[in-house]
Amino acid sequence: MSRLLVLVIAVVILLIGGLFFLSGRDTEKQPVRVEKVVPLENLSN
């Protein structure tokens, strides 16, 4: 096989492997509850 064909096949395999790796990662984060102090003047409106 020519070197160009081997290079193209290697790049395609790396791209497909990268897509599978990225799709398998758990990127969902749990929501973080942040408590803020709310002044009472804002609640009277």
Image: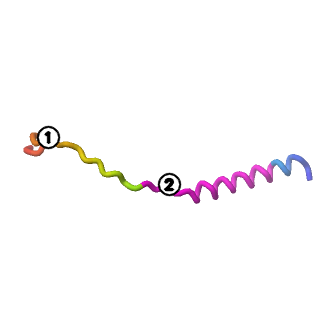
Q: Which residue is mark 2?
A: 27
Specify the amino acid type for callout 2.
Answer: Thr
Crowding at dot 2, Cα within 10 Å, few <14 / some 14-19 / many 20+, comes out as few
Query: Secondary structure beneath disc 2?
Result: loop
- SS of the residue under disc 1: loop
Dots 2 and 1: beta carbons under 8 Å? no
- On whether residue 24 falls in the magenta region, the answer is yes
C-alpha span from label 2 to label 1: 36 Å
Q: Amino acid at mark 1?
A: Pro
Q: Nearer the viewer, residue 32 or 13?
A: 32
Instruction: Give the number of the disc on residue 4.
Output: none
Quarter of the C terminus within the rendering? top left
- N-terminal of the pair, mark 2 or mark 1, is 2
Q: Position of residue 20 (x, y in %)?
A: 64, 58
Which region is colored magenta?
8-29
Q: Residue at x 56, y 56 (%)?
A: 25
Q: Residue at x 10, y 42 (%)?
A: 40
Left or right, 32 with respect to 28, comes to left
The crowding category of the residue bearing disc 1, from other C-alpha atoms within 10 Å (few below 14, some 14 to 19, many at least 20), is few
| 39 relative position to 28: left or right | left
Residue 24, picture quadrant: bottom right
| Residue 31 coordinates in the image, percent (x, y) | 36, 54
Which is the main secondary structure of the residues drawn in magenta? Answer: helix
* Horizontal and vertical percent position of residue 6: 85, 51
Which residue is depicted at the point 79% across and 51% down?
10
Q: Which residue is mark 1?
A: 39
Residue 11 % position (x, y): 76, 49
